[in-house]
Amino acid sequence: MDENRLREAGVDYDAALARFVGSRDIYERYLSKLLADTHTAEAEKAFAAGDYEEVLEQTHALKGLAGTLGLKGLYESSADIVKDLRDGKYETLHEKLAQMKEEWERICEVIRNA
């Protein structure tokens, strides 16, 4: 993968690489696995079913994954949703989930082309 492309897309490559003990191969393997991750889709399904607890669980898991992989935009959007859900704020949840999905799709496209 082209680490400069990843950096330009907002990936904190160096910090994430450090979490993988400097192993570029392992880090990039995990980045590639994001393409098949289902947390975003599962959060959307849970939202459609009105299951905010499941939305929280799926979004929280995505937040951890994004943080570990250095995906700042995805981390921030998922963290915002987690905070709102914990605070009982549901008014903008639909919009924020759409933004999170958009960021997930964007970063997946970056990973595919990096």
Image (cartoon, grey):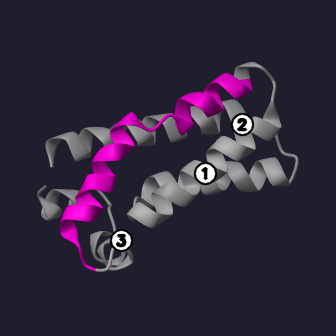
Residue located beneath label 2 in the image: 93
**Amino acid type of the residue that numbered disc 3 sits on in the rendered structure:** Ala
Residue 107, visible in the rendered structure: no
Q: Tell me, yes or no, whether the highlighted magenta stretch contains residue 7.
A: no
From the top left corner, tell me how far across and down residue 77 is, in percent: 56, 51
Q: Secondary structure at mark 2?
A: helix
Q: Earlier in the sequence, mark 3 or mark 2?
A: 3
Q: State the separation of the CA atoms marked 3 and 1.
A: 17 Å
**Residue 113 vertical placement versus 27 (above, below):** above
Residue located beneath label 1 in the image: 61
**Amino acid type of the residue that numbered disc 1 sits on in the rendered structure:** Ala
Residue located beneath label 3 in the image: 16
In the image, the segment drawn in magenta is 22-47
**Residue 49 vertical placement versus 16 (above, below):** above
* Residue in the picture at 28% in, 76% down: 14
**Residue 55 vertical placement versus 83 (above, below):** above
